[in-house]
């Protein structure tokens, strides 16, 4: 569910609302990012329409007018306890592990790679969906088999890689790089069909870069279209103790602009 989202259950349908709240380092920050919930909802809707796979949106559902721009009606699914992460580039926690062990989530990679390098092929690195309030845990594919069975684990992996490949091509055609992302899936309770759920390919679930800046190789080549500006500011201005400081207006505005720019680039 998108960061800051809430749900109201009614029969087999759910009203899923995305808020403007923003968090970093396990803390909800003040103020939120104006329009963030609406932007993430818009992008998720757009991506669902681009992907040839069943999803949880209920096209017949009527969203209350008060939250029409930042909410969707979705069908309840039998969710799988696996977060399906796909990485196309070496960055973030993957880069940190690679420097230490030459692997990403236990998957061996060629020697000599640098931060931000494109991987020879996308890799699937699942995580276990921890109970509410706990951190998700990176797991091996074999561990995912233990959790959900071989058939389901294979279906989750194959669907995730296929969606990532398609979405990457769409993004690249618009001058944007999809570096990594995560998906969540459930089974339709009536048909058993594997169904894409939650948010999909948004700035909060994915890492996107500007393809031109990436190719230029400058200091901004890995600048992402998300809340990284917020994380960087907080890391530089807070020691992790007590209540985080209030975000400056200019940081909030810059983050909001990055969210809006990605939508404009992808959907224009």
Image (tube, rainbow, N blue to C red):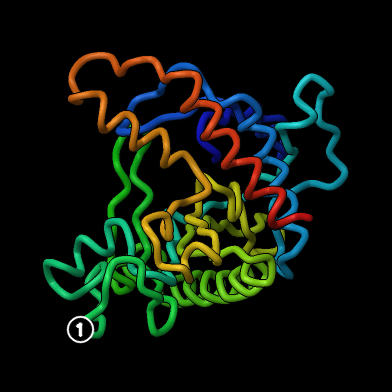
Q: Where's the C terminus, which quadrant? A: bottom right
Name the residue at 72% across, 43% down.
42
Res 238 → quadrant: top left
Q: Where's the N terminus, which quadrant? A: top right
Res 259 → quadrant: top right
Name the residue at 53% across, 52% down.
79
Query: Label 1, on which residue?
Result: 111
Res 211 → quadrant: bottom right
Residue 140: image location, x then y, percent: 28, 69
Residue 125: image location, x then y, percent: 36, 67
Nearest the eye: 198 or 208: 208
Residue 267: image location, x then y, percent: 75, 55
The residue lying furthest to the left in this view is: 100
Name the residue at 55% across, 27% down.
253
| Above-or-below relation of 85 to 165 | above
Relative side of 135 to 182, left or right = left
Nearest the eye: 115 or 187: 115
Name the residue at 29% across, 42% down.
135
Relative side of 179 to 260, left or right = left
| Above-or-below relation of 26 to 44 | above
- Disc 1 is placed on an element classified as loop
Crowdedness near tag 1: few (<14), some (14–19) or many (≥20) residues, C-alpha within 10 Å? few
Residue 168: image location, x then y, percent: 59, 70
Relative side of 224 to 256, left or right = left
Count how many numbered circles sit on residues in the image: 1
Nearest the eye: 39 or 193: 39
| Above-or-below relation of 27 to 79 | above
Nearest the eye: 9 or 156: 156
């Amino acid at each position: 569910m998108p960061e800051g989202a809430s749900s109201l259950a009614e029969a087999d349908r759910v009203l899923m609302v995305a808020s403007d709240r923003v968090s970093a380092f396990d803390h909800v920050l003040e103020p939120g990012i104006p329009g963030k919930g609406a932007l993430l909802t818009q992008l998720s809707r757009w991506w669902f329409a681009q992907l040839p796979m069943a999803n949880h949106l209920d096209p017949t559902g009527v969203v209350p007018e008060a939250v029409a721009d930042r909410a969707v009606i979705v069908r309840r699914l039998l969710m799988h306890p696996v977060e399906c992460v796909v990485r196309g580039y070496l960055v973030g926690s993957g880069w940190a592990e690679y420097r230490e062990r030459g692997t990403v989530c236990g998957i061996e990679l060629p020697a000599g790679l640098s931060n931000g390098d494109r991987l020879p092929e996308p890799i699937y690195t699942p995580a276990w969906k921890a109970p509410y309030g706990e951190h998700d845990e990176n797991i091996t594919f074999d561990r995912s088999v233990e959790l959900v069975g071989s058939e389901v684990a294979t279906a989750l992996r194959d669907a995730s890689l296929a969606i990532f490949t398609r979405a990457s091509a769409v993004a690249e055609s618009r001058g944007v790089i999809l570096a990594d992302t995560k998906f969540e899936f459930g089974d339709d309770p009536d048909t058993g069909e594997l169904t894409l759920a939650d948010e999909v390919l948004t700035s909060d679930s994915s890492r996107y870069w500007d393809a031109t800046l990436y190719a230029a190789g400058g200091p901004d080549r890995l600048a992402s279209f998300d809340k990284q500006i917020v994380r960087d500011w907080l890391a530089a201005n807070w020691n992790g103790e007590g209540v985080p400081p209030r975000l400056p207006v200019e940081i909030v505005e810059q983050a909001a602009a990055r969210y809006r720019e990605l939508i404009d680039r992808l959907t224009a």
